[in-house]
Image (spheres, rainbow, N blue to C red):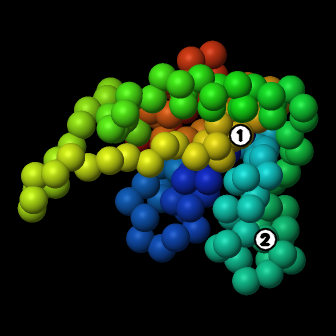
């Protein structure tokens, strides 16, 4: 089994005091025991921000048996198409829950003005499409984005 890893799972184990640290560690260990752990360029780049040098990042990946698998044209095309579909369907000022995917609007508790949202960035779609093309499943805590835009992707959370 090949398992793709989202950045939030790795940050859980790298950032001291993270509330999901133990569950994410167990999730990674279980999936490593059943196959290979991979990550895409976006996760590699986001992870690089936590390490003082490229050498230390590479050492971490080697010690955890994770490897970078480059995206191919098909996964990049899927990411672009799904992001475009998301942008077309985006409900103005509606927010989406990262756990269940439900949409809602929000007002400022101070002045009662409607709070506007920023669109989900392309990087989440690159991670999802890469996992869809190169892995059997994705480990992530951002279930909403994948539930709504990658229904054909098996996403596993440590929650």
Instruction: Please name the residue shown 48% across and 23% down the image.
Output: 89
Q: Nearer the viewer, residue 120 or 139?
A: 120
In the displayed structure, 122 sits above or below 53; it is above
Instruction: Please name the residue shown 80% across and 28% down the image.
Output: 77
- On screen, residue 66 versus residue 47, left or right, reads right
- In the rendered image, residue 146, in percent from the top left (x then y), is placed at 54, 30
Instruction: Please name the residue shown 78% across and 71% down the image.
Output: 57
- In the rendered image, residue 103, in percent from the top left (x then y), is placed at 31, 29
In the displayed structure, 56 sits above or below 30; it is below
Name the quarter where the C terminus is drawn. top left
In the displayed structure, 55 sits above or below 4; it is below
Q: Nearer the viewer, residue 143 or 105?
A: 105
Q: Nearer the viewer, residue 84 or 130?
A: 84
Q: Which of 96 and 28 is in front in this view?
A: 96
- In the rendered image, residue 53, in percent from the top left (x then y), is placed at 80, 81
Mark in front: 1 vs 2: 1
- In the rendered image, residue 70, in percent from the top left (x then y), is placed at 89, 45
Outermost top residue: 152
Disc 1 secondary structure class: helix
């Amino acid at each position: 089994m090949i398992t793709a890893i989202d950045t939030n799972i790795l940050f859980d184990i790298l950032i001291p005091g993270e509330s999901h640290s133990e569950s994410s560690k167990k999730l990674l260990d279980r999936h490593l025991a059943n196959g290979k752990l991979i990550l895409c360029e976006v996760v590699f780049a986001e992870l690089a921000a936590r390490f003082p040098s490229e050498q230390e990042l590479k050492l971490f990946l080697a010690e955890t048996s994770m490897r970078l698998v480059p995206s191919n044209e098909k996964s990049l095309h899927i990411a672009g198409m799904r992001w475009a579909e998301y942008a077309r369907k985006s409900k103005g000022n509606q927010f989406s829950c990262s756990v269940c995917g439900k949409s809602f609007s929000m007002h400022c508790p101070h002045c009662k003005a409607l709070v506007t949202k920023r669109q989900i960035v392309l990087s989440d779609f690159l991670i999802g499409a890469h996992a869809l093309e190169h892995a059997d499943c994705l480990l992530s805590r951002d279930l909403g984005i994948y539930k709504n835009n990658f229904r054909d992707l098996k996403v596993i959370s440590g929650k």
